[in-house]
Amino acid sequence: MKVTSKQIAEICGVTRGTVDRALNNRPGISAETRQKIMKVAEELGYRPHFLAQSLVKGETKTLGIVLFDIHNRIFSQLFHSFEAEARKQGYFIYLVLSNKDKELEIEYINSLLDRKVDGIALSPINKGTKFESFLNRSNVPILSFGNRLSARFPFVWIDDKQAIKEAVSHIVSRGYRTFIYVSPPLRNKGKENIYVPEQRHKGFLEACKALTDIRYHVITDRDYLMTIKRLVNEAEDKPAILCSSDIYALDILRFLKTHKIRVPEHVGVMGFDNIDILNYVNPPLTTIDFNVDEIGRRSAELLIENIKGKDIPLRTNVGYTIIDRDSL
Amino acid sequence: MKVTSKQIAEICGVTRGTVDRALNNRPGISAETRQKIMKVAEELGYRPHFLAQSLVKGETKTLGIVLFDIHNRIFSQLFHSFEAEARKQGYFIYLVLSNKDKELEIEYINSLLDRKVDGIALSPINKGTKFESFLNRSNVPILSFGNRLSARFPFVWIDDKQAIKEAVSHIVSRGYRTFIYVSPPLRNKGKENIYVPEQRHKGFLEACKALTDIRYHVITDRDYLMTIKRLVNEAEDKPAILCSSDIYALDILRFLKTHKIRVPEHVGVMGFDNIDILNYVNPPLTTIDFNVDEIGRRSAELLIENIKGKDIPLRTNVGYTIIDRDSL
DNA sequence: CTGTTAGCGCGTTCAC
DNA sequence: GTGAACGCGCTAACAG
């Protein structure tokens, strides 16, 4: 079943060196013996032993990708385009899921390194200098997306801060003057890598502070729905609820519906991410779309370039667009 | 940076054989030298070279999983539990996406075999004896889910046929007598592996034929929405639309809403799969839930058992439940 | 042109 | 207890 180059050598009455020259069409071999070897190899269905090749070449043509969440559509979509691009270039992918477990993430990265991946793409949940020096010791190219590490690691994502600012402008242009901003908890700031929600939050604050005649609230509670209800009731004019991700917006839309609060008549809602299920939601949600496929593709592309020794940009932003629908 | 057992041997003034005995705590070594070696290994941050180990051991502790679709929530969820179980047992996963491309699927499987994975979990898009003899030549355990191969390959899934039959009973118990069944195209039957839609379709037909005083239509067109509209208009009594998957149901709900056809007042709708986004849809969709996590977990578990030489069942069904909501 | 040799890093007999 | 030697399957540099 498993035929080796040694066997082919014996059958052809030559040595493995010669077989190798034929198989990898290298110079220094007569057309005649080459043909013969190729024919035998073909007949026997010879396939090189990838591990043995990797061992001697020092490269595995394998990438590791570490995600903290696969249920989030963004990441499964991102994986899809990452994998497609990597495959085109002959790379296979180990996909590992850290589930936002910081220790597991480190354990996984160690295992990937043990397995000699040529590079790692990472949506990190760890942060800080200790973690980064751990990464630096690895000696393989590492690229990040989603949450960011320090400027030393190439990062592919969108400009969250700017995007939120534009969202605020957009909402203001719709006539709103009262904002409710919904974000995941931000208190783990020191411990966990929550770059994305932080950036979006900062963007929101900066946008508001640059405006006059604006009221705004930031909600980061776990049971944010009750807080929202209270704020909506207390509001003097029609408020806009800006969500740091569509998932919150969906939850809120459902909640408002059960409480007979109408969107956009009584309150405006805007999301972020444009996850595909928005197609089936009512009312159609205004949100921010960004090119996830591009993030995946570029990440693979850049990581591989880096593996091949090229310098790559430390920051790559992909585009985004406000998708104007009926919830504002 | 990369420290080998050879280096440790030199430092400790012993040979690699001895180092190996210490590292893999095997007998035949004095406690003293063992301690010394372990200490040095620790200090140098020694990590065994996984490829070299794999090469000599003949196992890679790596599984391949081939999916034809990652955008389908079912599969990303399935991967999640598959990976978690595999990880517990020390396996890493190559995730490859065939995108329903039959040739790509074969190419991928070949590459996985080249890379000496210990086993493959497959949601096949190919079918037939030729494909299966190709798989058989591989000599590694192969397990399937989703679409099925012949009885020679272990299969982990649900009993689609029985589930649909129960769905029909459920709908009948709600008083419906007219059915519209929506399925993906079935004409590729000979070429492509469409086991799941076939089984569900068969189940539907069998259920209907066992009943009297029942009218039913099966729709497999690409633009099924127009057909549905026509059928709903022509129906003498209130029809139930049974969908072979939730995605159709969502599309249909949206379509009906834009045409002012009310659910369930004018027409009933039922889905299949209970994808998580149903939480945000209105009206809440009646559907069939099945234990996807269990499929992923069991698949990994069984595949690994098989790798270890155990016999495993050729068919494993996980449970399902009808989720009764408000669309019927 | 082809054969020989020496690794890649590790596991596993054998002797001593 | 420890060392020496061979093999996993392949690549590559050096002779001839």
Image (cartoon, coloured by chain):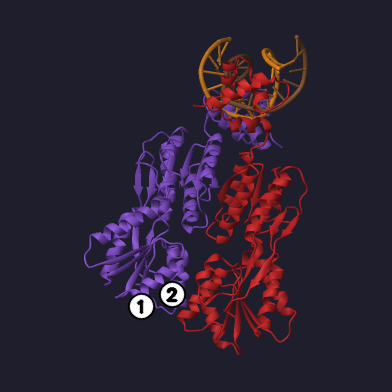
Chain colours: A purple, B red, C brown, D orange
**Residue bearing mark 2:** A256
The image position of residue A228, as x and y in percent, is: 40, 69
Left of B224 or right of it: where is A327?
A: left
**Which quarter of the figure has residue B272?**
bottom right
Identity of the residue drawn at 58% across and 51% down = B103
**Which quarter of the figure has residue B200?**
bottom right
Q: Look at label 2 and name its amino acid.
A: Leu
Q: Nearer the viewer, residue B33 or B172?
A: B33
Q: Nearer the viewer, residue D16 or B212?
A: B212
Given the image, what chain letter belongs to the residue carrying mark 1?
A
Is the residue A327 above or below the residue A91 in the image? Answer: below
Given the image, what chain letter belongs to the residue carrying mark 2?
A
The image position of residue A215, as x and y in percent, is: 28, 67
Q: Nearer the viewer, residue A240 or A284?
A: A240
The image position of residue A214, as x and y in percent, is: 25, 67
The CA span between labels 1 and 2 is 10 Å
Q: Nearer the viewer, residue A292 or B43?
A: B43
Identity of the residue drawn at 60% across and 84% down = B239
Left of A287 or right of it: where is B4?
A: right
Is the residue A248 above or below the residue B300 in the image? Answer: below
The image position of residue B250, as x and y in percent, is: 52, 72
The answer to which of marks 1 and 2 sits earlier in the sequence is: 2
Q: Residue A266's mark? A: 1
Q: Look at label 1 and name its amino acid.
A: His
Task: Give SS at disc 2.
Answer: helix
- Specify whether residue A141 is in view: no
Q: Are marks 1 and 2 in contact (CB under 8 Å)?
A: yes
